[in-house]
Amino acid sequence: MTQQNQQQQQMQQAVQSAQQAQQAAQSAQQAAQSAQASANTQQLQQAQKAQQAQQQVQQAQQEVQQAQATAKSQQNNLQ
């Protein structure tokens, strides 16, 4: 495998992991929303769950940013 092919593959992997992290962020966001929706019934417990879900969202978003930064730097390497 030539070096360029290898770099292209690495970039694709970085893009894929960015997409996966994005999906994780979306599902965490949905979890946060449903937790908040049912928070009206069991307020304290659900509020804590919603908070946890929001933290997961933030973590997932950081992962997205890192994966995108990786993809970008690898794109720069390709050029």
Image: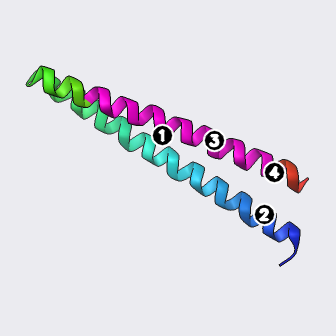
Q: Secondary structure at mark 3?
A: helix
Mark 3 or 4 closer to N-term? Answer: 3
Comparing 34 with 54, the one in front is 54
For residue 64, side relative to residue 68 (left or right): left
Mark 3 and mark 4: span between their CA atoms? 14 Å
- Of circles 3 and 4, the one toward us is 3
Residue 73, how many percent across, how many down?
79, 46
Tag 3 residue: 66
Identify the amino acid type marked 3: Gln
Tag 1 residue: 60
Q: Which residues are magenta?
A: 50-75
Mark 1 or 4 closer to N-term? Answer: 1
- Residue lying furthest left in this view? 41
Residue 7, how many percent across, how many down?
80, 63
Rendered position, 6 above or below 59? below
For residue 55, side relative to residue 74 (left or right): left
Mark 3 or 2 closer to N-term? Answer: 2
Tag 2 residue: 8
**In which quadrant of the rendered image does the N terminus lie?**
bottom right
Identify the amino acid type marked 4: Gln
Identify the amino acid type marked 2: Gln
Protein image colouring: rainbow
> How many C-alpha atoms fall within 10 Å of the one at disc 1: few (<14), some, or many (≥20)?
many
Q: Which mark is residue 16?
A: none
Mark 1 or 3 closer to N-term? Answer: 1
Mark 3 and mark 2: span between their CA atoms? 18 Å
Tag 4 residue: 75
